[in-house]
Structure formats: C-alpha cells, structure tokens
Image (cartoon, rainbow, N blue to C red):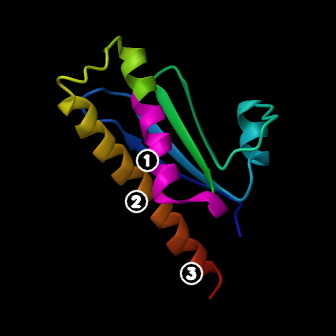
Amino acid sequence: MNTIHSHRIHIPIYGGVLIIYSVVDFTEIEKIFEFDLQDKFGAITWHRNKTFYAAFMVDYITPENIAHEAKHIINKIFADRGILLDPTNDEPECYLLGWIVKEIYKGLHIKIISTLNETK
C-alpha cells in the first residue's frame, strides 16, 4: 500500500494549483519538499510559486482539520494575489472556502476509497 496519495486541482477564478496529500506520516513530505518539521502536526499547508499544498495525516482527517487548513490556503491565495480580506464583503472568501473544503474532501475521500479497495 502506498503511504502518500495526492489529488491535483486547478483553482478557479484565482488561478494556480491546489495539491492535496494524504499520508501516514510526514516523512515523505519532509523528504520531497526538504522540510524539517520539528513540531508534530496532523495537517499542514504551504505554497511555492502559484502552487498551494495541503497534507493530512490519515489519523487526523476531520471536518475541523479540513476547514482549518482550507482557511490557511485562502489566506495564502489572497496574500499571493494581493487581495485583502474584507469582513464586510466576504462572499469571495466564502465561495473559495466552500470550494477548497469540497476539493479537499473529494481528494481525501478518493484516498480513503482506494485504501479500502487495496485491503480487500
């Protein structure tokens, strides 16, 4: 069974790519991206150029963690594009939040289904 699965999506309106990883632990992510994660997390986000990443350890895939990391991704996308968050006009942010949560859920759901099929 693979220990790292990914799901790649083009980000509408704002451009760029979102790549979602599900992993058993962050060992392979640390090697691939040359991270040294001193602290232990259940999920992380980062970006390089116009690519945005989220990685979730399978034991920490929860609605709370998906929403939490989605918000980090929104902040990174908006900062990268020079867009200020506006609490009086938050529809663009809310649209993007819903889309990111949906795509993370779909990407992680694909991983869960493929894992179940591998164990049959």
Residue 112 lies, in percent from the top left, at 54, 70
Residue 55 lies, in percent from the top left, at 60, 46
Circle nearer the N terminus (1, 2): 1
Q: Kindly identify which numbered label has been placed on residue 67.
A: 1
Q: CA distance from mark 1 to mark 3?
A: 27 Å
Q: Dot 2: what SS?
A: helix
Looking at the rendered image, the disc whose residue lies closer to the viewer, 2 or 3, is: 2
Give above or below for 29 relative to 120: above
Q: Kindly identify which numbered label has been placed on residue 117.
A: 3
Q: Nearer the viewer, residue 100 or 71?
A: 71
| Residue at 30% from the left image edge and 45% from the top image edge | 99
Q: Dot 1: what SS?
A: helix
Q: Quadrant of residue 24?
A: bottom right
Circle nearer the N terminus (2, 3): 2
Q: CA distance from mark 1 to mark 2?
A: 13 Å
Residue at numbered disc 2: 106
